[in-house]
Amino acid sequence: MKASPVEFRLRSVIVLAILLLGFYAPWIDLWGIGRRMPLLEWLPLQLSHLEVGSFAVNTSIVLVAGALLAAIGAALRIGGAAWLGPATLLHGQMLGDAMMADGPYRYVRNPLYLGLMCSVAALALLMPPTGALFVLFAVSFFLLRLVFAEEAFLDSQIGESYGDYLRATPRLFPRFHASLLPSGRKPQWLRGVLSEIAPLGIFLALAFESWSFDLARMTRTIVVFYGIGLVARAAVMGERRQPGLPE
């Protein structure tokens, strides 16, 4: 069930491949499985057919829910990155020289993966229903594999103190009352934002552009922010490699 080191190193590429497959949904054209209609239109339509509110009301609820999921995802990703630090966040290998128990990590062990799942769920509204279902299952399964691999690695590297952290902090469902005291570590907010620009693009597309139902425009916004995020991440990592800068 645990992800391999290769999967961990290629985690961003694997998630991106799953998302692209969900958007394309080749099984619709090949085998006629599903309809090529975005989930943000299909879901309100199905609810109205079941007489659960009108189409207009259901549409508003779905769009607001999508924007809220995107906002939570962006906040968790930025918060997690700010406290963890880009050097660790973007590293191609698991690092086990220290344990993070500050910021969002006091309430949930994997805020970055939880944030990614929220962003993916919001992004799935732009996919065909069968594509969205595939993406939600595939990404959830892959992230759980990453979580189990990281937990086993950190437990072997850190030992008893990490076991205490596991018992005090839930894996993916946040606890609203933290039982751990903060260590006083300061977050790197600017670097956190720069390393997580892509989730901001998803939020902006869902919060401000989804009401037009212009899928091309929303997709363009997300792609542009993803590209900017890649450049920003490269710049952050380049800065971290300069000698004399603290990690």
Image (cartoon, rainbow, N blue to C red):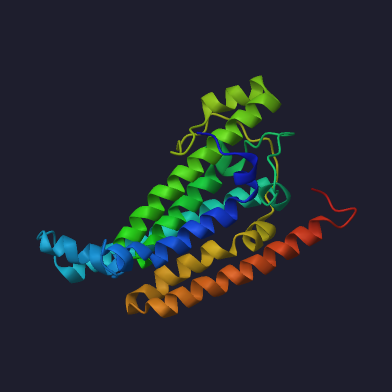
Q: Residue furthest right?
A: 244
Q: Residue at x 49, y 35 (%)?
A: 171
Depth check: give the residue in front, 155 or 240.
155
Q: Residue furthest left?
A: 51
User: In this rendering, is residue 198 above or below 103?
Assistant: below
Q: Position of residue 214 (x, y in %)?
A: 36, 79
The quadrant holding residue 7 is: top right
Q: Residue at x 24, y 62 (%)?
A: 43
Depth check: give the residue in front, 150 or 179.
150
Residue 74 visible (yes or no): no
Q: How many marks?
A: 0
User: In this rendering, is residue 129 above or below 8?
Assistant: below
Residue 102 visible (yes or no): yes
Q: Residue furthest top?
A: 160
Q: Position of residue 81 (x, y in %)?
A: 63, 51
The quadrant holding residue 96 is: top right
Q: Residue at x 67, y 22 (%)?
A: 159
Q: Residue at x 36, y 73 (%)?
A: 210
Instruction: Decide if residue 50 is on the left or right side of residue 129.
Output: left
Q: Position of residue 136 (x, y in %)?
A: 39, 52
Instruction: Decide if residue 121 is on the left or right side of residue 148.
Output: left
